[in-house]
Amino acid sequence: MDKLQLQVSPLLQQRQQCHTKLERSKAQLSAKLEQLRLSATQLAGQIAEAPHIRRTAVAVDAEIGELEKKKVYKQRIQEKGQERKSFSDRLQENQRLYQKQFEELRQKLELLEKPESTCPLCEQDLDLSVRERVVEKTHNHQREVQEQIWTIREQMSTCERELQVLREEYGRISQQLQPYDSLLQQFGQLEARFEATGELQEQLLQIKQEEQRLHLALANGQYARETRQEMQEIEQKLQQLNYDEQSHALARGEVERWRWAEIVQGKIEEASRRQAALDAQNPSYSSRLGS
């Protein structure tokens, strides 16, 4: 029995080591399977957001479209403002010219009011009737110039009011256009996320396939093949040695009981011998015990 145990013990130790390796491999696969399930759950959650992302992107795109219309409107306001500004500049130039002309006519009238004045054109002496006609004509011309100045001033005032309205409208539209760049960035991000949904679905499919493979491997014990092959070889060797662990344990127990009985029997016989030796040395003591 001990000889068999000496042959079996290394095999049992190797079998225990293989069992430990198998349990470790199983634990690693189980942990990997759990991680795959968590990843699949996360990906499924991200994919489920695709419709919401799409709706948000459509809404943002609509906002961008409205702002682009306002950008066109803003450009038109700017062009209108530039046109009004150019018109205002021309009015100012015309006013300056008319002011100059008005001043020249005023100076001409001052000269004509002097008795010794001559004709402004031919520098000849003027008689009374001619002087009066020239003065009247100059006054009429001065009134026309003055009316032109008033008209120009009125146009300039109107033009300035229009420019003020355009400035205010330009500022208002500019304020409304402030989110434009951020909306463009947001739309780009949403579009990228939505387009990535296809890649996420492909990743989820791969994860599901790997998850199924690991599940079957664990269920059918299709992992750590080398270790399982080694363990089968060990079991075959134990069978060849006709080793049965339970029977061997019972046999060892019976042997131990027989050994214990022999030990007890030996102790009893030893005690009897000692008693006989004492009796031989002290016969009187034995006689007294007998009486």
Image: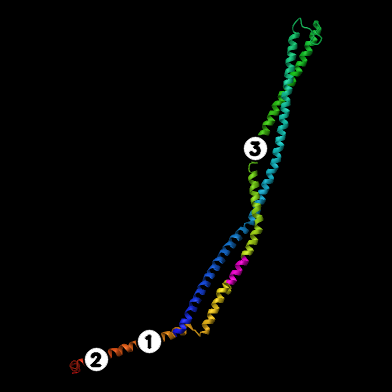
Q: Quadrant of the N terminus?
A: bottom left
Helix, strand or loop under label 2: helix
Direction from residue 139 to residue 207 in the image, left or right = left
- Residue highlighted by disc 3: 172
State the residue in front, 36 or 151.
36
Is 224 covered by the magenta stretch? no
Q: Identify the amino acid type marked 3.
A: Arg
Q: Determine whether the residue tagged by mark 3 lies in a helix, strand or loop.
A: helix
**Disc 2 from disc 1: Cα separation:** 27 Å
Instruction: Measure the C-alpha gap from mark 3 to mark 1.
Output: 110 Å
Which of the numbered marks, if any, corresponds to residue 259? 1
The mark found on residue 196 in the picture is none
In the picture of the structure, the residue carrying the numbered disc 2 is: 277
146 w.r.t. 284: above or below = above
**Viewer-proximal residue among 111 and 191:** 191
N-term-proximal mark, 2 vs 3:
3
Residue 256, quarter of the rendered image: bottom left
Q: Quadrant of the C terminus?
A: bottom left
Highlighted range, magenta: 208-217
Q: Amino acid at mark 1?
A: Arg
The picture quadrant where one finds residue 120 is: top right
Query: Gap between marks 2 and 3, in whole Å?
Result: 131 Å
Q: Amino acid at mark 2?
A: Ala
Where residue 54 appears, as percent x and y from the top left, is 66, 54
Could you say which quadrant of the image residue 236 lies in? bottom right
Q: From this viewpoint, is residue 80 visible?
A: yes
Whether the magenta-drawn stretch holds residue 214 is answered as: yes
Mark nearer the viewer, 3 or 1: 1
Residue at image position (53%, 82%) is 237
Q: Position of residue 101 (x, y in %)?
A: 75, 17
